[in-house]
Amino acid sequence: MLLINQDFSTYMREEQSMWNERNLMVQYQIKNRGISDPLVLAAMLAVPRHLFVPPDLVHLAYEDRPLPIGFDQTISQPYIVAQMTALLKLKEGDTVLEIGTGSGYQAAVLAAMGVNVISIERKPEVMEIAKENLKRAGIFKINLIISDGTTGYEPGAPYQGIIVTASAPSIPKSLIDQLDDNGRLVIPVGDRYIQELLLIKKEGGNLYKTMYGAVRFVPLIGEEGWKDK
């Protein structure tokens, strides 16, 4: 007779429950709201979001809301993560620059899509949280850098995609300069309280802007962003 360790059995039930919640999240919060990119849907299903939120908020991990992660930072609501990722129209092998590592969740979703990810975070204490979260999730192939993200990361340029997970007063010129031709930049731009989600497409040296509605992000602090209060 095979005896199953009670702790392991409990762990498996919890994991199954989280997977069920994640599946519902993808179906109802993301797919049913118009996100159809198969790479994005598969990545959102594969990445365990509950490993990227504080332990006391795990029960809220798959709800359609942003959550605080400490140090005045948040993890974006699942739909916004999916929408911003889908707007980049990535394919496997592309190189993407993320500005604002935060909990590491957005970087994990990008990595699960088979793209090369460089992620910049200005706060060392937040980067430590991201590193631990990514380690627990078994995701290691992300280049994590502590720096001023508003000026991008020239050694990795040009980028087929740039995603900014904090709000800027205007589009940083450095990010435009480091964007590949036919590349895409997704960024919230506005004041410190409400912003417009923008998609910037670079084609033949020209820039084309499309707006995707009002959002609210923490401010992008740095040389080409907001000044730290």
Image (cartoon, rainbow, N blue to C red):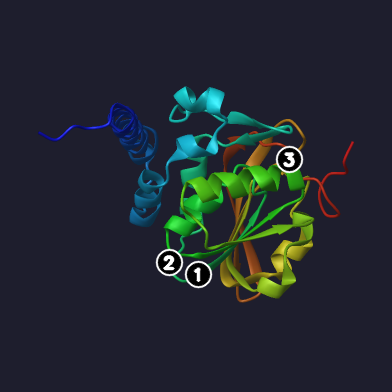
For residue 140, above or below residue 179: above
Three-letter code for the amino acid on which mark 2 is drawn = Lys
Q: CA distance from mark 2 to mark 3?
A: 29 Å
Determine the residue positioned at 66% across, 74% down: 205
Residue 44 spot, x, y in % from top left = 40, 45
Q: Which residue is mark 1?
A: 94
Classed neighbour count for the residue bearing mark 2: other residues with Cα under 10 Å, few (<14), some (14–19), many (≥20) = few
- As drawn, the residue found furthest toward the front would be 1
User: Between residues 87 and 165, which one lies in front from this camera angle?
Assistant: 165
Three-letter code for the amino acid on which mark 3 is drawn = Gly
Residue 182 spot, x, y in % from top left = 55, 71
Q: CA distance from mark 1 to mark 2?
A: 6 Å
Mark closest to the chain's N terminus, 1 or 3: 1
Q: Which residue is mark 2?
A: 91
Q: Which residue is mark 3?
A: 190
Cβ–Cβ below 8 Å for labels 1 and 2?
yes
- As drawn, the residue found furthest toward the left would be 1
Classify mark 1: helix, strand or loop: loop
Q: CA distance from mark 1 to mark 3?
A: 28 Å
For residue 201, above or below residue 180: above
Quarter holding the N terminus is top left
Q: Quadrant of residue 206?
A: bottom right
Determine the residue positioned at 55% across, 52% down: 107
User: Between residues 68 and 137, which one lies in front from this camera angle?
Assistant: 137
Residue 123 visible to an observer of this rendering: no
Instruction: Classify residue 88 as left or right of residue 4.
Output: right
